[in-house]
Structure formats: structure tokens, C-alpha cells
Image (tube, rainbow, N blue to C red):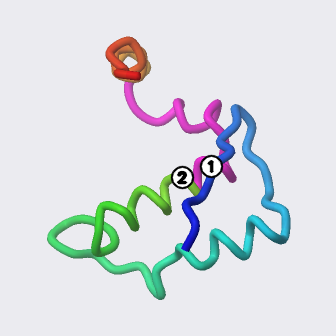
Amino acid sequence: MPEIKWDIRREGRAWSSDEARQRWKLTPEKIEMHEGKLFWSHEERLNMLAMLLENVGIDRTVLFGDPELWRKAIKELKT
């Protein structure tokens, strides 16, 4: 399966039909919890997070959690 190029914007967005088909293939059959974490693998969690970020957008996402922690994480981001 080709790697997805995520298009996460400040505002959330709906997917085109091609994007929706690609992303649907990445979703687990059902939501499960394993050892206190959603889904079975780190890759599944990252895929679901990226899909939600595309739909919700960055501006709404950063309202969750402590703004100072977001700033610190961005400041320490390694590129």
C-alpha cells in the first residue's frame, strides 16, 4: 500500500473521494483497546490520529491540553 501524504491544515476539511478510499483502507476493522492503548499498533494509532487531524484541523486540536506544552514541543521539534 502506498504511503499516505497527509494534508493537515489549520482548519479541518472533508476528503475527496480518492482520499476517502485511501484512508478507509487504513482504518482497523473495529476500535479495540490493548494494554490500555487504542488499537493494536503504534502505526494504527498514528494513522487514526492523522485522519482525525485532517478532519478536525490544527486550530481545534491545540485546544486540547496545556498550551505551554504545545509550545515547548514545537520549540524542541527536531527537523
Q: Pinpoint residue 20: horizontal percent, then vertical percent.
A: 74, 70
Q: Pinpoint residue 55: horizontal percent, then vertical percent.
A: 69, 53
Q: Main secondary structure of the magenta part?
A: helix
Q: Is residue 1 above or below residue 7?
A: below
Which residue shows up at 32% across the image and 15% down it? 76
Q: Amino acid at mark 1?
A: Trp
Q: Amino acid at mark 2?
A: Ala
CA distance for labels 1 and 2: 7 Å
Which residue shows up at 75% across the image and 65% down it? 19
Q: Is residue 22 above or below residue 45?
A: below
Say left or right for 56 vs 48.
Answer: right
Task: Using the image, tell me which numbered label, if any, was put on residue 52.
Answer: none
Q: Secondary structure at mark 2?
A: helix
The first of marks 1 and 2 along the sequence is 1
Residue furthest left as drawn: 35
Residue furthest top as drawn: 75
Q: Are marks 1 and 2 in contact (CB under 8 Å)?
A: yes
Disc 1: which residue: 6
Q: Pinpoint residue 62: horizontal percent, then vertical percent.
A: 52, 31
Foreground of the two, 5 or 60: 5
How many numbered marks does the figure carry? 2
Which residue shows up at 42% across the image and 56% down it? 46
Foreground of the two, 59 or 9: 9
Q: Write the start and end of the magenta stretch as one range.
A: 52-66
Q: Secondary structure at mark 1?
A: loop
Q: Pinpoint residue 33: horizontal percent, then vertical percent.
A: 28, 75
Quadrant of the image occupied by residue 2? bottom right
Q: Nearer the viewer, mark 1 or mark 2?
A: 1
Quadrant of the image occupied by residue 51? bottom right
- The quadrant of the picture occupied by the N terminus is bottom right
Disc 2: which residue: 50
